[in-house]
């Protein structure tokens, strides 16, 4: 199984290239600026340059594409593993005592021995 996965990883294609950085938007901030009380914006937060947000969106889409490209469906392997475990449990389960070959062999030996001893006794007593 490990060999199959390793061989598939060797045959896998190269991942798609990372998206290019966005061009700066005219008038954008050069760095992230904290927004504080008393500013013209009535909330707290961080103002990011517009191109940074565009880059984050591109990277998010790129990451999703990579995840879908290299996702391995393990459902079939899990199903086969469960089937193998069920077969093993079935094989290891002992049959009832009267269905075992060894039981019938022992019964045959006892009956055969009894017949031989009984026959010998009858021959000795009669003769």
Image (cartoon, helix red, strand yellow):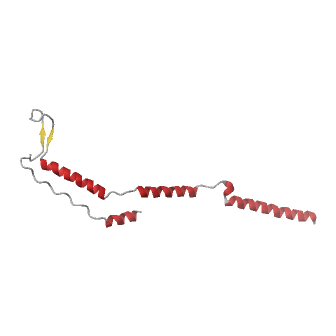
Horizontal side of residue 96 vs 14, given as left or right? right
Q: Position of residue 88 (x, y in %)?
A: 53, 57
The residue most toward the top is: 38
- Count the labels in the image: 0
Residue lying at 19% horizontally and 50% vertically, measured from the top left: 56
Q: Quadrant of residue 39?
A: top left
Horizontal side of residue 71 vs 86, given as left or right? left
Check the picture and name the quadrant holding the C terminus. bottom right
Q: Position of residue 94 (x, y in %)?
A: 61, 55
Q: Position of residue 119 (x, y in %)?
A: 86, 64
Residue lying at 72% horizontally and 60% vertically, measured from the top left: 106
Q: Position of residue 41 (x, y in %)?
A: 11, 36
The residue most toward the right is: 127
Vertical position of residue 44 compared to residue 81: above or below:
above
Vertical position of residue 93 compared to residue 49: above or below:
below
Horizontal side of residue 64 vs 35, given as left or right? right
Check the picture and name the quadrant holding the N terminus. bottom left
Horizontal side of residue 21 vs 62, given as left or right? left
Residue lying at 13% horizontally and 50% vertically, measured from the top left: 51
Vertical position of residue 4 compared to residue 71: above or below:
below
Q: Quadrant of residue 76?
A: bottom left
Viewer-nearest residue: 69 or 118: 69
Residue lying at 33% horizontally and 57% vertically, measured from the top left: 71
């Amino acid at each position: 199984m490990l060999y199959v996965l390793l061989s598939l990883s060797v045959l896998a294609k190269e991942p798609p290239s990372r998206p290019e950085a966005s061009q700066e938007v005219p008038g954008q901030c050069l760095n992230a600026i904290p927004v504080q009380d008393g500013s013209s914006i009535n909330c707290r937060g961080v103002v990011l340059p517009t191109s940074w947000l565009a880059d984050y969106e591109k990277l998010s889409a790129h990451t999703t594409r990579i995840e879908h490209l290299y996702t391995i469906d393990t459902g079939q392997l899990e199903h086969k593993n469960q089937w193998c475990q069920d077969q093993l449990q079935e094989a290891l389960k002992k049959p009832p005592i009267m269905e075992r070959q060894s039981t019938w062999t022992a019964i045959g030996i006892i009956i055969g021995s009894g017949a031989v001893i009984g026959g010998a006794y009858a021959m000795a007593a009669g003769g």
